[in-house]
Amino acid sequence: MEIIFGLIIISLLLALIFLIFFMVAVRNGQFDDDHTPSVRILFDDKVSQHPTSQK
């Protein structure tokens, strides 16, 4: 029975650690831009304006 209590405590501590990491990521703005990655492939690449020499 002691092992069950130990596993419960360890799992709760692990869940708390993941929650803290998630909250830090949200505060740092990691999840702010959720629209651009899904449509980034639809945008055209910019064409460079470097002149090329033709001979």
Image: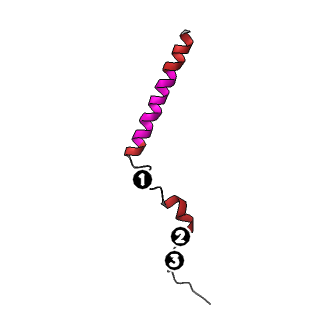
Q: Secondary structure at mark 2?
A: loop
User: Measuring 45% from the left and 31% from the top, which residue is drawn there?
Assistant: 17
Residue 48's disc is 3
Magenta span includes 14: yes
Disc 1 is placed on an element classified as: loop
Q: Is residue 42 shown left or right of residue 30?
A: right
Q: Main secondary structure of the magenta part?
A: helix
Report the mark closest to the observer, 1 or 3. 1
Q: Residues within 10 Å of mark 2 (few under 14, many from 20)?
A: few
For the residue carrying disc 3, how many other residues have a C-alpha within 10 Å: few (<14), some (14-19), or many (20+)?
A: few
**Residue located beneath label 2 in the image:** 43
Instruction: Give the spatial CA distance, label 2 vs label 1.
Output: 20 Å
Task: Give the answer, above or below, for where 45 lies relative to 12.
Answer: below
Q: Which residue is mark 1?
A: 32
Task: Pick the residue in front: 47 or 2.
Answer: 2
Magenta segment range?
10-24
Chain-order first, disc 2 or disc 3 = 2
Q: What is the x, y in percent for residue 32?
A: 42, 53
Q: Are the residues tagged 2 and 1 within 8 Å (C-beta)?
A: no
Residue 15 counted in the magenta span: yes
At x 51% / y 14%, what residue is drawn? 5
Find the distance from the CA under tag 2 to the CA under tag 3. Answer: 15 Å
Q: Position of residue 19 (x, y in %)?
A: 44, 34
Circles 1, 3 touching at the beta carbon (< 8 Å)? no
In the rendered view of the protein, which quadrant contains the N terminus?
Answer: top right
Q: How many marks?
A: 3
State which mark lies toward you, 2 or 3.
Answer: 2
Q: Residue sitting at 49 percent across and 27 percent down? A: 14
> Of label 2 and label 1, which has the lower sequence position?
1
Q: Secondary structure at mark 3?
A: loop
